[in-house]
Image: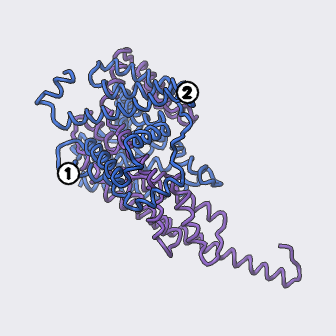
Chain colours: A blue, B purple
């Protein structure tokens, strides 16, 4: 189905159509970042940076309509500049100064929380009262927040400011913004290659299939331990769910909502305990100038273990009793 | 059993442990896994392409960036600071708890204030230190380091368990996608609703733990101070006296 038929088709829900609009907006923001970086002479890596954001933006606009092998090839083109360390940012002339943010607080004060909360509130309203994807809700919330912010300080917050600030955020986060998506793609590759099956064979050799409580305990502990090893619950959830969750828990009729939701946060308990999650556990040690490299992890182990136990019990109570 | 298929996992572990470029590590793991499984190149590209298209939702943060940068420019962090500073007459443990509650509520609406570098270091830590150093007391360096660990720990706990309350956060989108690949339809608001008691317990447990921990450190500081002052009196009564 091409884009025109897609929009005209009665079989496609309004939610799906609006979602594609959201993806086009994401694409355009990325393309804006690409163009701005390409023209930024202070950025030594402007070509690589423009390729990264440009291809990403393009994939958002046309990715759905072209053959998936072409999308795959473009994903590889997109990550090449990051692999060769050719993505960077120029001199950030628009970074808000302390005087500027203090001036903003003086002018708006705590009313700033109204646009700040608008994203979450509108997303929730969409989720509860419509059949439209909450991602569309988030986008509407963002637009509403922008309008409120513009009304609060019309002279300061023109359209250009929002665009430039989003470009600034993209430059700050950089290619790491792709990490969750790439981990999900890796999970899909693992699954397609049968990694999940190997894991479930290993687990099946150790524990009996058909006992829901045992399955839940192994799945939750597996999520936490696998996350400790991989350093990221997003990398663990796909493989663990295909390998252990599906054959040992879900196939016995457990509620997939409860199981999936809690499995992820069991993984987060693993994140709290591992030096592999350097962003959360090691980088703060440097930022806060602490003496002990594991000073943050040491304060997180007890809450993480308690929460892991709590969630295992909660899952058993909700689905197995 | 084809244990060799697990090589991709090993690559991720080694790559992250040796601090290779994370995107490079993921790509190598994906390619190696595909080669071992005997996937032909076109099928591999198709898997990647489909993976990208079906996970586009995880970049919803790009839309959110349209607002967050400008919120910061208009004094969001200053407003958050003024809200936090209403917590008065508390111990450091309670300051941490207050920050946890504050952080988890805002995280549920996907509002952040700059994490450890942007908020914990400039706002939470000074408040916590001031709380334990009231009335001219001094805290030991060990105590101070512990407080830093707690502040970063509360930041992580509240953010991890709070972000899953946000309908449309990337974690739950991934869960939804994984479940739908397995043939189970799950909805985002329900996925988030299950996390409400988890988030409440997580922040409560961490607060109690840090409160008790901090109290113990305060007592130890007082003991040490008392010991030092008796030692000092001993020394001065003996007529000696450097230090």
Q: Residue furthest right?
A: B239
- Identify the chain of the residue marked 2, using the numbered disc in the image: A
Give me the residue at 40% from left, 50% from top.
Answer: A155
Residues tagged by mark 1 and mark 2 found on one chain of the structure: yes
Q: In the rendered image, which quarter contains the N terminus of chain A?
A: top left
Location of residue B47 in the rendering, given as x and y in whole percent from the top left corner: 34, 23
Residue B131 visible in the snapshot: yes
Which quarter of the figure has residue A184?
top left
Earlier residue among tags 1 and 2 = 2
- Identify the chain of the residue marked 1, using the numbered disc in the image: A
Q: Residue furthest left?
A: A10
Q: Which mark is residue A128?
A: 1
Q: In whole angstroms, how far apart are the C-alphas of marks 1 and 2?
A: 45 Å
Give me the residue at 50% from left, 29% from top.
Answer: B25
* Label pair 1/2, CB-CB below 8 angstroms: no
Which quarter of the figure has residue B48?
top left
Q: In the rendered image, which quarter contains the C terminus of chain A?
A: bottom left
For disc 2, the neighbor class at 10 Å (few under 14, some 14 to 19, many from 20) is some
Element marked by disc 2: loop
Location of residue A138 in the rendering, given as x and y in whole percent from the top left corner: 29, 45
Residue where numbered disc 2 is placed:
A45
Q: Residue furthest bottom?
A: B237
Give me the residue at 57% from left, 59% from top.
Answer: B148
Location of residue A295 in the rendering, given as x and y in whole percent from the top left corner: 59, 54
Mark nearer the viewer, 1 or 2: 2
Residue B108 visible in the snapshot: no
Q: Nearer the viewer, residue B3 or B50?
A: B50
Element marked by disc 1: helix
Q: Nearer the viewer, residue A61 or A108?
A: A108
Location of residue A13 in the rendering, given as x and y in whole percent from the top left corner: 15, 35
Q: Nearer the viewer, residue A318 or B97?
A: B97
């Amino acid at each position: 189905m091409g884009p025109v038929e897609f929009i005209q088709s009665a079989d496609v829900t309004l939610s799906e159509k609006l979602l594609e609009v959201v993806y086009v907006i994401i694409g355009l923001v990325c393309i804006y970042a690409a163009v701005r970086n390409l023209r930024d002479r202070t950025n030594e890596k402007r070509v690589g940076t423009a390729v990264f954001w440009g291809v990403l933006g393009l994939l958002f606009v046309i990715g759905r309509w072209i053959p998936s092998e072409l999308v795959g090839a473009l994903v590889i083109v997109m990550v090449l500049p990051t692999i060769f360390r050719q993505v960077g940012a120029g001199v950030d002339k628009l970074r808000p100064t302390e005087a500027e943010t203090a001036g903003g607080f003086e002018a708006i004060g705590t009313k700033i929380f109204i646009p700040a909360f608008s994203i979450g509130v509108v997303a929730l309203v969409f989720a509860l009262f419509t059949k439209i994807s909450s991602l569309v809700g988030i986008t509407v919330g963002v637009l509403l927040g922008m309008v409120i912010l513009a009304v609060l300080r019309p002279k300061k917050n023109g359209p250009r400011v929002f665009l430039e600030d989003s470009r600034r955020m993209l430059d700050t986060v950089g290619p790491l913004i792709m990490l969750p998506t790439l981990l999900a793609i890796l999970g899909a590759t693992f699954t397609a290659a049968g990694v999940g099956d190997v894991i479930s064979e290993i687990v099946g050799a150790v524990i009996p299939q058909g006992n829901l409580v045992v399955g839940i305990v192994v799945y939750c502990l597996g999520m936490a331990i696998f996350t400790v090893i991989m350093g990221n619950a997003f990398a663990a959830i796909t493989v663990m769910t295909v390998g252990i969750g599906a054959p040992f828990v879900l196939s016995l009729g457990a509620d997939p909502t409860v199981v999936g939701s809690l499995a992820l946060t069991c993984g987060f308990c693993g994140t709290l305990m591992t030096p592999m999650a350097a962003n959360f556990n090691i980088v703060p040690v440097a930022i806060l100038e602490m003496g002990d490299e594991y000073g943050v992890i040491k304060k997180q182990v007890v809450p993480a273990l308690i929460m892991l136990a709590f969630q295992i019990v909660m899952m058993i109570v909700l689905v197995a009793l | 059993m084809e244990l060799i298929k697990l090589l991709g996992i090993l690559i991720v572990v080694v790559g992250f442990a040796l601090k290779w470029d994370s995107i490079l590590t993921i790509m190598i793991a994906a390619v190696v896994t595909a080669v071992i499984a005997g996937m032909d190149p076109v099928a591999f590209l198709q898997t990647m392409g489909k993976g990208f298209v079906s996970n586009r939702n995880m970049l919803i943060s790009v839309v959110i960036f349209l607002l967050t940068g400008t919120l910061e420019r208009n004094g969001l962090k200053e407003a958050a600071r003024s809200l936090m500073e209403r917590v008065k007459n508390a111990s450091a443990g309670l300051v941490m708890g207050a920050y946890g509650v504050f952080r988890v509520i805002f995280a549920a609406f996907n509002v952040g204030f700059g994490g450890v570098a942007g908020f914990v270091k400039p706002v939470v830590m000074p408040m916590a230190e001031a709380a334990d150093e009231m009335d001219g007391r001094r805290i030991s360096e060990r105590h101070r380091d512990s407080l830093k660990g707690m502040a970063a720990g509360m930041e992580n706990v509240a953010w991890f368990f709070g972000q899953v309350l946000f309908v449309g956060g990337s974690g739950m989108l991934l869960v939804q996608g994984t479940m739908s690949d397995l043939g189970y339809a799950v909805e985002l608001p329900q996925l988030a609703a299950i996390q409400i008691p988890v988030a409440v317990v997580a922040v409560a447990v961490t607060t109690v733990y840090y409160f008790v921990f901090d109290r113990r450190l305060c007592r130890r500081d007082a003991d040490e101070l008392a010991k030092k002052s008796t030692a000092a009196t001993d020394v001065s009564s003996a007529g000696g006296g450097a230090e």
